[in-house]
Amino acid sequence: MQKDFKNYKFYCRILFLSVLFFLGCAVKPKFIVNNYTPPVTVAVLPFNNLTNDLDGPVYVRKIFSERLKYKGYIVKPLDETDDILRGIGITDGGQLSAFKPEKIGEALNVDGLFYCDLLEFSYITVGFYNKRAVSASFKLLDAKNGNLLWHDEKKVSRTDVALSSQEALKAFKDHIIEKTVEKTLKIPLREEVKELVNRVLLTLPGR
């Protein structure tokens, strides 16, 4: 009995350490510079939209900027950032690659610049199959020299498969209503976006 209890404790300890190891791996970014020193002031630049959704990049950027403050960063207001960027000829995230980060950083007077490529932002409702998905690639550059400090990419998706034609019809109606409400309120894929941002920020060291 005592031997069985020791074995139980041993396997529980192994399981606990395995979970810790898995979680440690799961929250690592794709890249982080050695001896990372968080920039004090940062700007979240307009997103490079690689999707067909026009509301997606605006909403993800807004949520990312809001949540970033809780990591201790001083975030330049988005409206102020956009006004300054327009002054140097940038009106869209797709134009950012034509400008050196140093020039953008100097114009915005910040220490760090967050860039993002919105890779997927979709609602798919086909017969028995419904899917909502968002994915994005984020990176933080040193505004003084353009060096990459941190980079990560995440995807969040939710898939529902109906088991009958009745369920499929109900799911179709529910998803159409949900999509319409979210679009009207300018909060597209709200839950998926929030989860995506939370996952990304888990890999970004705070100040």
Image: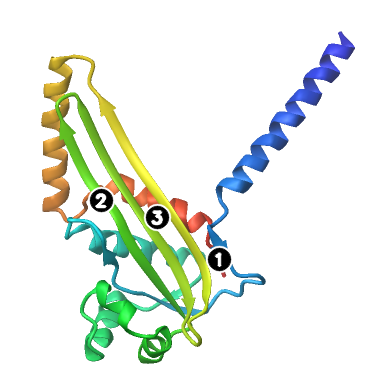
User: Circle 1 is placed at which residue position?
Assistant: 206
Give left or right: position of 14 versus 83.
right
Q: Are marks 1 and 2 in contact (CB under 8 Å)?
A: no
Three-letter code for the amino acid on which mark 2 is drawn: Phe
Task: Judge by depth and name the residue closer to the eye, 40 or 168.
Answer: 168
User: Circle 3 is placed at which residue position?
Assistant: 197
Give SS at disc 1. loop
Give SS at disc 3. helix
Residue 66 lies, with reference to residue 89, above or below; the image says above
User: Circle 2 is placed at which residue position?
Assistant: 121
Three-letter code for the amino acid on which mark 3 is drawn: Val
Is tag 3's residue or tag 1's residue first in the polypeptide sequence? 3
| Alpha carbons under labels 1 and 2: distance apart | 27 Å
Dividing the image into 4 quarters, which one contains the C terminus? bottom right
Total label count?
A: 3
Q: Residues within 10 Å of mark 2 (few under 14, many from 20)?
A: many
